[in-house]
């Protein structure tokens, strides 16, 4: 077995802490959430694409709406290349619109490009791959518009439906498990890591 350096362990722990910092969003700790990304950081998820700073502002609006979300974050798989790393992390999004009485669970993987600048690891780009999802009914059964559900890939249709019903539209198709979009995302990430 190969020996692991203290630097490697310290970098890995810093990245794990960084990825787990996503809970700041669920806790409405907006200033702490902004610290997870470098100033030029971008995010691309179902309901938002663009600069991370604007994502935090949009998350504040979501936090003031009837839509509640919670993210369960797994242990990250990290591939290092100098002061860059690709990080893939299993996550589960639990969401509920308290006014509608409708919720969902969505299993995804965050795919992050992270970079160490001035001694700090932060996210440069966050994307998501959606694996599967289902509806939840906290107050009993709910009539679901099947045509609206069918607009989106099965893997994240419940999440997209709930987002749209809550006023956060999903504008395009996103990466799903084993899709061409996932393959392209990972190829672009590898190219970035090796550049």
Image (cartoon, rainbow, N blue to C red):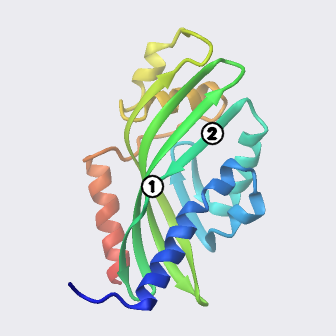
For marks 2 and 1, the one nearer the N-term is 2
- Mark 1, residue position: 74
**Residue at the (42%, 35%) spot, across then down:** 156
Q: Is residue 184 left or right of residue 103?
A: left
Total marks in image:
2
Residue 147 seen in this snapshot: yes
Q: Which disc number belongs to residue 110? A: none
Quarter of the image with the C terminus is bottom left
Residue closest to the eye, 134 or 56: 134
Q: CA distance from mark 2 to mark 1?
A: 16 Å
Quarter of the image with the N terminus is bottom left
The image shows residue 31 at horizontal and vertical percentages of 77, 63
Q: Residues within 10 Å of mark 1 (few under 14, many from 20)?
A: some
**Residue at the (57%, 25%) spot, across then down:** 103
- Mark 2, residue position: 69
Element type at marker 1? loop
């Amino acid at each position: 077995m190969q020996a692991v350096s203290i630097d490697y362990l310290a970098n890995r722990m810093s990245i794990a802490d960084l990825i787990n910092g996503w809970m700041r969003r669920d806790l409405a700790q907006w200033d702490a959430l902004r610290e997870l990304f470098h100033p030029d950081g971008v995010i691309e998820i179902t309901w938002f694409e663009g600069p991370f700073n604007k994502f935090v502002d949009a998350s504040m609006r979501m936090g003031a709406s009837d839509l509640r979300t919670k993210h369960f974050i797994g242990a990250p798989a990290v591939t290092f290349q100098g002061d860059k790393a690709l990080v893939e992390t299993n996550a589960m999004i639990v969401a509920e619109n308290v006014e509608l009485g409708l919720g969902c669970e969505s299993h995804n993987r965050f795919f992050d490009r992270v970079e160490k600048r001035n001694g700090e690891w932060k996210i440069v780009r966050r994307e998501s791959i959606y694996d599967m999802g289902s509806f939840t009914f906290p107050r009993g059964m709910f009539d679901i518009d099947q045509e609206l559900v069918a607009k989106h890939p099965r893997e994240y249709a419940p999440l997209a439906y709930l987002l749209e019903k809550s006023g956060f539209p999903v504008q395009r198709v996103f990466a799903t498990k084993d899709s061409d979009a996932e393959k392209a995302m990972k190829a672009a990430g590898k190219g970035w890591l090796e550049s």
